[in-house]
Amino acid sequence: MRLSDFDYVLPADRIAQVPAEPRDSSRLLVLDSSSGETEHHRFHELPALLEAGDLLVVNDTRVTARRLLGQKATGGSVEALLLREVSLGTWEALVRPGKRVKPGTELHFGDGLTATVVGETAFGGRTLKFDNPEKVSGAGSVPLPPYIHAALESDDRYQTVFSDAPGSAAAPTAGLHFTAGLLDLLNASGIEIASVRLDVSIDTFRPVQADDPADHKMHGERYSIPERTATAISRCKGRVIAVGTTTVRALESAAIGYRRVRCGESVTDIFITPGFEFKAIDGMITNFHMPRTTMLLLVAALCGIDPLRNAYKIALESDYRFLSFGDAMLILPRSHE
């Protein structure tokens, strides 16, 4: 297996620049992981595509990262992407130009918001200590992916309707298709919904550089599994369907046996590639991903490389929209065995 096995041509005009309105009007490609067959649907049809007794598990993390533009006290522009608040007023951040921003550097971001670089991170970023941390949440903007060039009317459109736990640098975008009404319909159809939290960090952004995926190293991301979710998985009589690759990573990191998941908090550096033995999930909902990415390898591990290639070929030929604000794919066997 080589990274080139997960390459494909993604035309720029297939990258969605704005989300579908309403959220659940997006298209949904259903892939049978047993046969490789595909069907075309709309996301709001999800209750009819699932079965009573199925369990959906979502990632309820909330995007709290901010993109700040400012200047060094000595002059020169600087951009800081705040990833995670490690203590009150102290954030891990990606800073550009990083090499010129050494510990001790004072940064000014406007409206009286100032910070001092107090250290470097293991992933090549910087640790910033803000003099007035109460101003951070209202400063800057939500950090949209770099391939999205359109501005959002509201930052809430880059949050899921079930987002609750703060701590992410990016949204778990497979969850963006859900509406409150759709969640009600799913519950009414006998489909249970549970949650985990995985704080999306730089593992989502970093490309796979090595041609042998086995040489790629993941940095740790924090996750939490509530006791209620672990119990729901163990007693599920249908299929366990993860919403998004981040949910898959959290559940499989916590798996201690078939349909057995350890509750609690931890850090995961799991890298799921073809050949992986899934213990916690049967299927998943996911968006269409960039070529040569960790997310694409994870999806291939669940459905197979050839079925994935064929599904992406069909999606491109059928004018599906790709990446964060694009359409979705549902991967699952027809029934739980």
Image (cartoon, grey):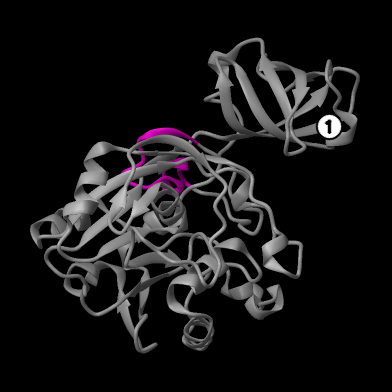
Residue type indicated by callout 1: Ser
The local secondary structure at tag 1 comes to strand
| Crowd rating for badge 1 (residues with CA inside 10 Å; few <14, some 14–19, many 20+) | some
Where residue 326 appears, as percent x and y from the top left, is 48, 66
Q: Is residue 76 magenta?
A: no
Q: Give me the residue at 53% from left, 45% from top.
A: 170
Q: Quadrant of residue 185?
A: bottom left
In front: 104, or 114?
104
Q: Is residue 306 left or right of residue 282?
A: right
Question: Label 1 belongs to which residue?
Answer: 77
- Residue 54 visible in the current orientation: yes
**Quadrant location, the C terminus:** bottom left
Residue 150, image x, y percentages? 59, 55
The quarter in which the N terminus is drawn is bottom right
Looking at the image, residue 139 sits to the left or right of residue 188; the answer is: right
- In percent of the image, x 8 and y 58: which residue is there? 188
For this orientation, the residue located farthest to the front is 257
Residue 164 part of the magenta-drawn span: yes
* Residue that lies at the very extreme toward the top in this rendered image: 131
Q: Is residue 203 left or right of residue 200?
A: right
Nearest the viewer among 274 and 183 is 274
Say which residue appears at 85% left-offset and 17% top-offset: 73
The region drawn magenta spans 153-167
For image coordinates 53% across by 81% down, the residue present is: 305
* Numbered circles on residues, count: 1
Determine whether, in the image, residue 26 is placed left or right of residue 324. Answer: left
- Using the rendered image of the protein, determine whether residue 113 is visible from the camera's viewpoint: no
The x and y percentages for residue 213 are: 68, 66
